[in-house]
Amino acid sequence: MLGWGRAGGLFSLAAAIVLAACSPASPTTGTARASQVVLTFEVPRETSPPPASANPPSGRVRIAFGGDVHFAGSSAAALNGNPGSAVKLLKQADLSIVNLETAITDRGTPGPKEFTFRAPAKALDVLRDAGIDVVTVANNHGMDYGPVGLADTLAAGRRAQLPIVGAGKDAKQAYRPYRTTINGVRIAVIGATDVLDTFAQSSWPATATRPGLASAKDTPRLVRAVRAARAQADVVVVDLHWGIEMESCPSARQQELAAVLTGAGAQVVVGSHAHVLEPHVQQGRTTVHYGLGNFVFYATRPASVRSGVYDVVVDRDGVVRTKWHPAQIYGGRPALLTGPAARSADRAENELAERCGLA
């Protein structure tokens, strides 16, 4: 989806495509024959941001990031409209982004995997009302309920007026950024996943003719998307699903991909998937947070309940400063830490870079 700012309008078109069902037992929708599934995908209009000369004088923009979000298990309590006190920092930001690690659907067939997540459309209303501006569904759960579930997710995003990146009716749409201009700073947000189950590696990525997710495994395609976005934006943000579960130090692949993307013009690279916090590093006018951990999530392990909000202040030249706001998950929802607990958690997060050999 393509949008222009928190206060601006949201523009989208709809396109219908017909896919052959996997078997006679595949679900059907609308008036399709029993051997077909009708999927409706939202298609953003091709809209370019104004040229830099038309922008007002550059100000600063605060972008806030949260990690993995779903509404399974204890985190389903967030559907009552209270996703946790840490979310207020996202609402206070100029632009806020989270990783939505669930399909938004009540249809489809679950994939052949241990964990599959889905949530009702109300979940997007909760996130929007909490002040979240953009979600990425480019992750290893974005298509847990197949193309039908993905189509429902994108349609739900359109109805909720909550922009979704990292997925689409084809690769062009899946890699297309969300664009907005805030305080004279043109920002583009791209979502992509470097993590896919073996069975999904050939079927989940979007192609020229097939709906799906933006895949970071096709690194050249992602780099082209970043370069194209940078040509029309002052600041490019890439939100990635990457890394190794329960590993707090970034893998060689994460470090390599971060270097490639920042080299292509991304000033802010953030990620999730490990379900534990990973380090963040700032170099010049760029920053990388390798792992934001869980956010609204049914986490229970001591390491996986550590959460937080990553604040990044940018201007037209890139990153100005960053700040980590530590939180802890209770009952599936992140609560901000205060006092000695907050200082201790902040110190531990800030020391991670050195412990992982990144300082």
Image (tube, rainbow, N blue to C red):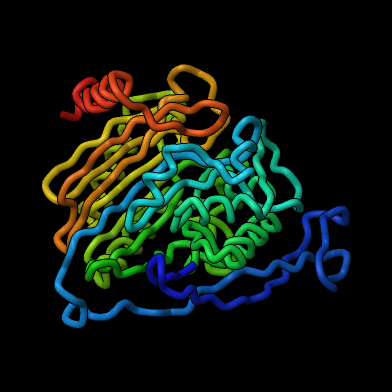
- Quadrant assignment, res 292: top left
Q: Nearer the viewer, residue 318 or 79?
A: 79
Q: Is residue 97 left or right of residue 62?
A: right
Position of residue 243 measured from the top left corner of the image (x, y, whole percent)? 40, 34
Position of residue 146 measured from the top left corner of the image (x, y, whole percent)? 68, 52
Q: Is residue 332 above or below residue 172?
A: above
Residue farthest front in this picture: 339
Q: Residue at x 18, y 41 (%)?
A: 282
Query: What number of labels is visible?
Result: 0
Position of residue 242 measured from the top left corner of the image (x, y, whole percent)? 42, 39
Q: Is residue 114 left or right of residue 176?
A: right
Q: Nearer the viewer, residue 203 or 82?
A: 82
Q: Residue at x 61, y 40 (%)?
A: 71
Residue 115 in sight from this viewpoint:
yes
Q: Is residue 130 above or below residue 86?
A: below
Q: Residue at x 15, y 51 (%)?
A: 320
